[in-house]
Image (spheres, grey):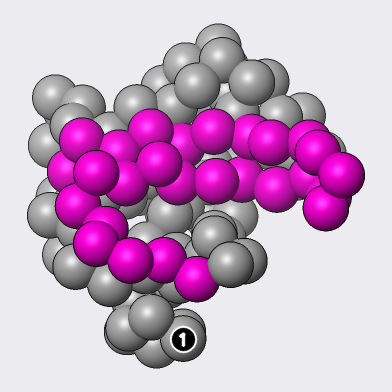
Amino acid sequence: MTESSVTISERAARRIGEILKGEGQGAMLRISVEGGGCSGFQYKFDVDRTKTDDDLVIAREGAVVLVDSASVPFLEGSEVDFVDDLIGASFRVNNPNATASCGCGTSFSI
């Protein structure tokens, strides 16, 4: 998959680039959706060096993000952002498909 239905904000791309730089050559950030969390589904962020043929690949400002094909429908139309506020710094997924989410922002339901 090459057409991106998931976007990465400029802030998130910069932060992902900083993280991946410390991980060495060929490192990419993988975002996936798994069952669990307090709202039914949760986002998972991992550093990965292996891209599969059916991964959605999003590249912005040196940051490469992978989304597996099973997670793409859950993330359709989402934007991954990086927020640094009073409660801490974290990646936040602004997901239009989520009907509810938990206070920590890593769990959602559809």
Q: Which span is picked out in magenta?
A: 76-102
Asked if residue 5 lies left or right of residue 88, the reply is left
Asked if residue 98 lies left or right of residue 20, the reply is left
Residue count near mark 1 (Cα–Cα under 10 Å), binned few <14, some 14–19, many ≥20? some
The x, y position of residue 2, in whole percent, is 16, 28
Q: At x 20% / y 35%, what residue is drawn?
A: 77
Given residues 60 and 38, the one toward you in this image is: 38
The x, y position of residue 57, in whole percent, is 30, 34
Q: At x 40% / y 41%, what residue is drawn?
A: 94
- The residue indicated by pointer 1 is 38
Asked if residue 1 lies left or right of residue 107, the reply is left
Question: In what quadrant of the picture does the N terminus appear?
Answer: top left
Q: Quadrant of residue 85?
A: top right
Q: At x 69% / y 36%, what residue is drawn?
A: 83
Q: Quadrant of residue 46?
A: bottom right
Q: Amino acid at mark 1?
A: Cys
The x, y position of residue 62, in whole percent, is 57, 17
Q: How many marks?
A: 1
Instruction: Relative to 104, say whether 56 is above or below.
Output: above
Residue 96 highlighted magenta (yes or no): yes
Given residues 26 and 73, the one toward you in this image is: 73
Q: At x 34% / y 76%, what residue is drawn?
A: 41
Whether residue 83 is visible, yes or no, is: yes
Helix, strand or loop at label 1? It is loop
Instruction: Relative to 32, say whether 57 is above or below.
Output: above
Given residues 94 and 15, the one toward you in this image is: 94
Asked if residue 68 lies left or right of residue 11, the reply is left
Question: In what quadrant of the picture does the C terminus appear?
Answer: bottom left
